[in-house]
Amino acid sequence: MRWVIRVGLGLAVLVLLALGLLALVPSDRVAAAVSNQFEAMTGRKLVLEGEVKPRLWPTLGVTTGPVSIANADWADSGTPLFQADGLKIDVNFAALLGGEVRILGLSADRPMINLIRARDGRENWDFGTAAAVKDSDANAVPAPATGFTLDEGSITGGSIRFNDGASGRLIALDDVDATLRVPDFSGPFTLTATGLTGGNGVALDLSGGVFSAFAAGRVVPLTASLAAGGSTLAFDGRGGLSPVAAEGALTADLSDLPALGSLVGMALAEPGRGLGQDRLSLTGQLTLDGSGAAFLRGAEIIADSNQIKGDLDLRPGEARPRLSAELVAGPITIGTGPGGEMGGGLGGGMQAEGWPATAIDVSGLGVIDAEIALAAPSLDLGVLKLGETRILMTIARARAVIDIRQMAAYGGQITGDFVVNGRGGLSVGGRLALAGLQTQALFSDLAGWDRLTSSGDMELEFLGVGNSIAAIMSSVEGSGALELGQGELRGVDIVEMLRTLDPGFVGPDRKTAFDGLAGTFAIAGGVLANRDLKLVAPSLTASGAGEVDLGGRRLDYRIRPTALAAEDGTGGVMVPLLITGPWADPSFRLDLESIAREKMEAEAKAAEDRAKEALKAAEDRAKAELEDRLRDDLGVEIAPDESLGDAARRGLEKALEDEARKALEGVLGGD
């Protein structure tokens, strides 16, 4: 605002110079003199093209051709700070004779204003210290000794561009019409403006007191209202512009976030149901401390049917603003609509054909960094319904981590953390521990499946990647463990099915009671695999193994009895049960083929064992016979650790020795 005042004062003083010179010198020399004096007052070069024409009637003033004010030396934008097709300045002649600058009208035709803030904080509208005016310079124009008034200053058909190098944002306003009125330099002033940004209408209405103090950068009473598309903001309190500071009541209707985001150079998406889709408002006591930080105390946020209260602090950051908040809410409902876009609960759950493929927009995570503590008595997420909840959400570089400090759910508690990562796409993950949860209500809300009635514990670690729920469910990786206590599985009587070998024991009046169920699982490529399920029932003990295709919503599972008591107390026939098909309509089938296959395999093994036993018996008989012959024919006793071959060789050697001895004795006896 101060640079606007300085430029306005400079232009007004130039009226005096122009009127005095136009009668004596050519127009081009007047333009040169005006440019020189403007540069002396502001430090920036003023370029006037065309004629500078005086006007004596009906008011005293001048009209110029195209005009421009040079940009800062460091602002390499290729465009001036200010340029317009022409200026028109009217002053009050009688007041001028009395030494007062009373501007009746100051208007700019189709001005273009280019504002730039460098990454290091320099601003091209900061004129700094104007060129030094030496006391010896007789041609210098002294600063006005008194204030000035402006009956009406206006711009028509203008455009404003603000390139903020510190945040990387570009704010653009077109078709700007604005009017500033300062009837008393030491009194109140008003500013009204309209324009377009991103195709949305923008309107500003501002009223302040003590213009002289406001122009000097001090805080004065101030009221303002701003409309951008369907959003409106109102402020009533005190404020100043150099630096920006304010204190007062803020009321905001944020029902059109995209329009508001376009105004401030940020991409804001329409919020979802429960997050402000139909209604989003904010009230509180706002404080701007002049450092770029904003503080909202006693804030009340209403998002659809949700009401949240607390304190919020917004501070500048290196790359993004940083929000800190302590919030307490009433019951929170973040619904997914009657269509059940999440695919759970009333949205069809098990009956749905597949997961939603609609793209999920998490671009808002990259707009701000945050640390938000939230406490609520209940939290309805559409898919999940939670009790008393306390969380700490941290957002950094488009990655949100939700640390669950307390979360009551389905008769138990959930602890752990949940991560939503919007860096270069979307991924979700978490490490959750669920203790004492009621399975019927949980699975009914989560997947529309209410057949399992029990309570127990579960640990889950997972990571899914994709820009839709369908993509995430088809890519999820992870692991976990499940342990349930006493309960029942409704819709099927596994015990009777296995006992009677009749797969027809299914229906709403059938159930399988059990004393416990436990197992671990691994998830890869959206498929959950389990190999160690243990089921203990009053008359049944079974193991289970198989796969659950989370992405395709299909089952392929096998339950095998390991002990089954018949009605007479003896063991029953233990036939595996196959559960296959889609979640919506799984089929149950007794695996009689596997029993036949196992029986054939058992018989083949028994035959093989019998053949091996017969062969061994034959070998033993042959060995015994050979031992007898060696003993009878050769008189050889087989040592315990001696083979038959070695014993036979030893017997033959002994027999040969005996025969040789007898022959030798016969020869010697003949002599």
Image (tube, rainbow, N blue to C red):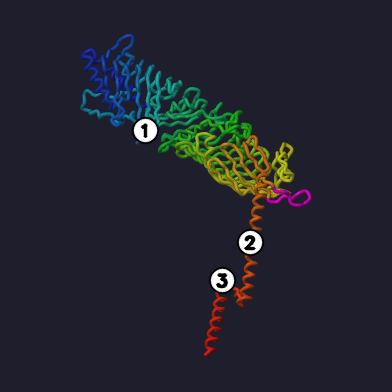
Q: Nearer the viewer, residue 293 or 441?
A: 441
Residue 615, label in figure: 2
The residue that mark 1 highlights is 165
Q: Nearer the viewer, residue 455 or 319?
A: 455
Mark toward the start of the polypeptide (3 vs 2): 2
The residue that mark 3 highlights is 645
Mark toward the start of the polypeptide (1 vs 2): 1
* Residue ID at (66%, 50%): 600
Quarter of the picture containing the N terminus is top left
* Residue ID at (60%, 48%): 531
Image quadrant in which you'd find residue 328: top right
Q: Secondary structure at mark 1?
A: loop
Image spot of residue 575 (x, y percent): 69, 46
Amino acid type, residue under disc 1 in the picture: Gly
* Residue ID at (23%, 20%): 33
Q: Residues within 10 Å of mark 2 (few under 14, many from 20)?
A: few
